[in-house]
Amino acid sequence: MRTRDSASLQERIVALIHERGLAPGAPMPTEVQLMDLLGASRNSVREAVRALKALGIVEIRHGHGTFVGHASLDVLTPSLAFQVRSGPGGGIRALHDLVEVRELLETELIGQVAQNTSAPRLAALNSLVNGMDRDREADRAFHALLYESCGNELVLQLIGLFWDVYHEVEPTLGPPEERTAEIVVNHRRIVAALRARDAEAAREAMRLHFRDVKARIARAEARSVPAPT
């Protein structure tokens, strides 16, 4: 009952945010005001606010008060990584599924991007490719920059979430493989297709990129299968 009541109070606080049209960064009603508005005890309000803080829905600034949060999808990284790791075979199959979802998303989007990628953006993408042999974060930045022009913040957060979870769980695949040259070639192929404004070539280049990732996962999955006795 306590858990259900706590969840209900969280929902009522979220409803209050929407009813009042409070934007991210706006100050929340005080703790005492929430107690009066919701007819709840101090402890119940505090518990609900802490739960909402963990979700990024509210932000507590010590000495200043409680504010509406931005609810970034970053807060889902630990739970999604845990879900992947807890899957069969140490999570290798679940990691394949995660990569497959990301592939479906990016392969569709890259066709749109190919139609309107500017020269400065192409130059920035090429610069990131040049840095991939020195900085793994260049890969993450490359995929984020690809889709900035889509004007879809949710897409950017989802791609960032999938990238972060993949690289957190990647050690389950075994010792790292030396694939820098392949990674660079794959990303250069994507940039070349964008430069040619060839949507189908861009989609095919993205498929090849993910085919390489999934092949590594398949090799790890094969190693994890017990030998027949």
Image (tube, grey):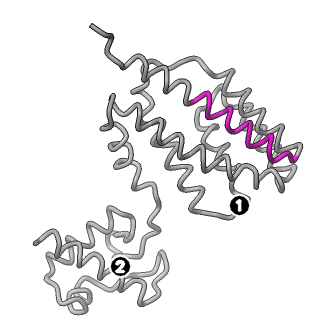
Residue 198 included in the magenta stretch of the image: yes
Q: Secondary structure at mark 1?
A: helix
Residue appearing at x 18%, y 90% in the figure: 39
Mark 2 and 1 residues: CB-CB less than 8 Å, in contact? no
Q: Secondary structure at mark 2?
A: helix
Q: Earlier in the sequence, mark 2 or mark 1?
A: 2
| Label 1, residues with CA under 10 Å away: few <14, some 14-19, many ≥20 | some
Left/right placement of residue 157 relative to residue 113 reads: left
- Look at label 1 and name its amino acid: Cys
Highlighted range, magenta? 197-213
Percent coordinates x, y for residue 121 in the rendering: 80, 49
Residue 173 included in the magenta stretch of the image: no
| Numbered circle sitting on residue 14 | 2
Q: Give the alpha-carbon distance from disc 2 to disc 1, as whole Å.
A: 29 Å
Residue 212 to residue 191: above or below:
above
Q: Residue furthest top?
A: 229
Q: Residue furthest left?
A: 1
Residue 147 to residue 3: above or below:
above
| Numbered circle sitting on residue 57 | none
Left/right placement of residue 151 relative to residue 88 reads: right
Percent coordinates x, y for residue 180 in the rendering: 64, 22
Residue appearing at x 15%, y 68% in the figure: 3
Main secondary structure type of the part rendered in magenta: helix
The residue closer to the viewer here, 13 or 53, is: 13
| Numbered circle sitting on residue 150 | 1
Residue appearing at x 71%, y 49% in the figure: 146
Percent coordinates x, y for residue 163 in the rendering: 53, 42
